[in-house]
Image (spheres, rainbow, N blue to C red):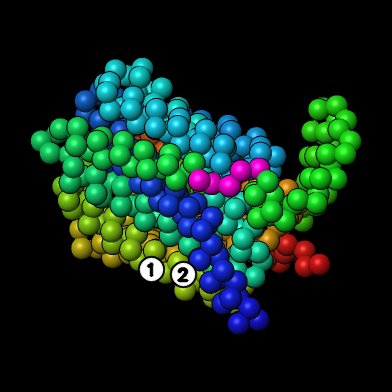
Amino acid sequence: MKIANGWAGKKVLTSPFVVQLLIIMFLVEFVKGALLISILPVYMGTVLGLSAYAVGWALALQYIGDNAFRSPLGWIIDRIGYRYVMLFGVLFTFAAVAIVSFTSAFGWVILACVLLGVGTSPLWPCVITGATAVAGNEASGTIMSVVYMAWLVGVGSGPIIINFFIVDNTYFPAFRLLIGMMILVVLVALFLPGRRKSMEIEGRKEIHAAEADAKPPFQVRIRAYFAKVRRSMHASRLLYPAMFTQNFALGLLTPVLTLYARTVLHLTPQQYSMYLVAGGAITVLGLIPVGKWVDRFGTKWFLHVGFLLSAVALPVLGYTRSLPYVLIIVAVIGLGYALIIPAWNALIAEAIPKSERGAVWGFFLTIEGLGMVFGSIMSGKLYDLFGPHAPFLVSGSVLLLLFVLHLFITRRPAVVVR
């Protein structure tokens, strides 16, 4: 089994299709991270004079746009393949970057947030569906580690690197870099597989050939499709609130993290970048080994330990003002998420039927995205009403609740072994 897992992991990492997906993941998340973490919150808070609650709502619009299309796009991937779905997304993302680059009006910035969400909505369904189709169950933990490494390196390096292109509050060099990256993303997306090749990758050619023989009315096909998906899924019902809760905890932090670092801890942009590196590097370095261990030993204990570490460390971070201690706490949070990310997504991947992988991943990602939306909205309100520590305290409490949910999920397994 160990040899088989190793071979499957090598097959995934050398697949040109997976490499294309990872390049797109890295570049899009770099652009998204630079905008959402380093540029837009500070710009809206200092230049436009918006409250933390208003900033949270603006960023929530991005998550709403992202979330609204994930489920239908997952279904569309199953029908027309990866190329046109991903092109739809990256062109909208390109438009969002262009709007932010060339205008400063509040209405246009809000539109850019919505377009950024809509544009990035195909990213996760395409990448996870394609990568897990190539990996299979034998290397699900490994491929999730690789996907999340591309995501973390992108979303982490974006805010860090972009700070070096913002000189004397001049954003033009930063926007020029982001536009150049989006041009490269469009070029890579053009070479993704079309409908026929996508079906071959996922082993669905025969299934769709049989379905093409007789086509009942569209509404009948839609109902039959979701009925088939529901019958083929084998997940514990507790997995659904757990998916929402996991991303709700993350959404509570995203809109206020930069504000907290700059206004409470009084970090310079360079210091803030160093702290992001401290947490992100530990997470990234831990993903591959943890992913391999998950494939070998299962998900249970990695999630138990990861949830507890993060649940304790986040509230402590919200009350800590000593910078050396903050650095240590950030490293502990990074370790917690290095344990959570591959194990959590391998757990979810096991519950997804092969025949309708894109649609179910889209549905699951929609549930997770709703957590980000509500977390972002509540985050700014907590920050304004109760102080900078409140989002961290609530986020830690939510992760503690998730630990309890996971205890019940593991007592009654989320996945039925066939």
From the top left corner, tell me how far across and down residue 238 is, in percent.
69, 53
- Give the residue pinned by disc 1: 285
Residue 221 in the image: x percent, y percent?
83, 33
Q: In the image, which residues are magenta? A: 191-195
Give the camera-side residue of 104 and 58: 104
Judging by the rendered image, the residue that carries numbered circle 2 is 288
Q: Quadrant of the C terminus?
A: bottom right
- Residue 405 sits above or below residue 411 on the image: above
Q: Are marks 2 and 1 in contact (CB under 8 Å)?
A: yes
Task: Specify the principal SS of the magenta part.
Answer: loop
Left-right relation of 148 to 215: left
Report crowding for label 2: few under 14, some 14 to 19, many 20 or more residues within 10 A (C-alpha): many
Q: Can residue 156 be spotted in the picture?
A: yes
- Disc 1 marks a residue whose amino acid type is Leu
Q: Residues within 10 Å of mark 1 (few under 14, many from 20)?
A: some
Position in image of residue 233 (x %, y %): 76, 52
Residue 276 image label: none
Residue in view at x 24 percent, y 44 percent? 162
Q: Visible in this render: residue 307?
A: no
Find numbered disc 2 in the image and state the secondary structure of the residue it sits on. Answer: helix
Q: How many marks?
A: 2
C-alpha span from label 2 to label 1 = 7 Å
Q: Nearer the viewer, residue 322 or 220?
A: 220
From the top left corner, tell me how far across and down residue 277 is, in percent. Answer: 28, 58
